[in-house]
Amino acid sequence: MSLFNSLSVSASGMTAQRQRAEVLVENIANADTTRTAGGGPYRRQDVVFEAQPVGQPFSSVLQAQLDNQPQGVAISEMVVDQSEPDRRYLPGHPDADKDGYVLFPKMNPAEDMVDLMSASRSYQANVSAISAVKDMINRSMDLFR
Amino acid sequence: MAAPIAPISLPRPIDPIVLPNAAAPASGFHNVLANAISQVVQSGDKADAAVSNYLAGGNQELHSTILATQNASLNFELLLQVRNKVVAAYDEIMKMQI
Amino acid sequence: MLDPVSTQLDRYLTLVSQRQKLVASNIANADTPGYQTQDIDFEAQLRAALQAPDSAAPAPPIASAVPGLRVKNDGNNVDLDREARLLSENALRFNMATNFLRSQLKDLHMAIQGGSA
């Protein structure tokens, strides 16, 4: 099991962090969305990461079972926030109900911003890992005179 | 009357000439060559096995595979140089006037 | 042809590679809930590998959880600073060992050529 598998692991990390960032950006952009296609205000989404072995090229399934595989990562599920939306009193709003209340998404933009920065940092760390491993592979090949 | 003539007996046969021990000595050149050849074959087989193992996704690292092939390559190179020297020496001898 | 030092360098490279693979895995799972940082006991494995006879095939090292790391709220204990440091360290070690090997191979090559091309 050579270093090439490690590239797949880091690539899976990049994919997962990118998808996490996309979801966070969607949350931030929809902080004030009162009307969605499915009816009701926008509901915040969260991703759940899960460690998963990444597939190896050229390798047999049996070998994969025997080795202690380094784990990649993947998004196992997307959790939609089920808590009650915020109610604000805005009688003139087009989406106001009969009492004049509008349902707004229950958001925590500060937390989402911090999460976005964390996703960016983790993404960068995965990029560094790919770069370091690629360098090691190239140096191995330098052993050919 | 004269005494009967004794028959002539054949002379004792001459012992065949025995050369000094003609077997190659333990550290002779012949052994060096044989060793080099067997090393080339062995390391070549190991390198082939390493490459096959690596390509089939076995538990082998890239650098180990490369080192095995370099090992085989160096052994082969040595054999090649030895052979060149032997041929050169042979040519020299053939050029000598007897 | 390649002497015992090359065999030891080969094993050293293998150990460093395996450690680096675990570092990459830790980085990929830096935000996975419940994930524990994995590492190998590098010094112990290195000592064992250097003392093993040349013909022995090295046993694959066991990855184990690293003690003493701060656990975050979601049960994950990956420290990106630690992993980034190890990433550089392993890369430098690998670099050093391949340089040694290259110079050894070059010397052997020159010796065989006898100083003339």
Image: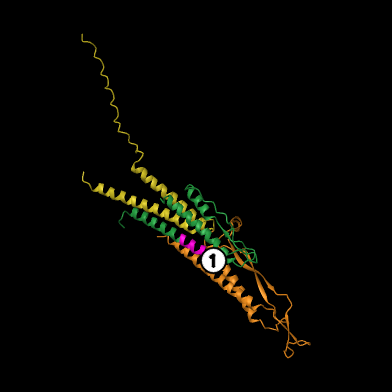
Residue A131 x/y as whole percent: 50, 67
Residue C74 left/right relative to B68: right
Residue type for callout 1: Asp
Q: Is residue C40 magenta?
A: no
Q: Quadrant of residue A68?
A: bottom right
Residue C69 x/y as whole percent: 59, 61
Residue A19 x/y as whole percent: 61, 73
Secondary structure found at label 1: helix
Q: Residue at x 63, y 81 (%)?
A: A29
Q: Main secondary structure of the magenta part?
A: helix
Q: Residue at x 27, y 49 (%)?
A: B91
Residue B54 left/right relative to B12: right
The chain letter of the green chain reads C
Write the start and end of the magenta stretch as one range.
Answer: C80-93
Q: Quadrant of residue A99?
A: bottom right
- Tell me: residue C52, above or below residue A121: above
Disc 1 marks which residue? C81
The chain letter of the yellow chain reads B
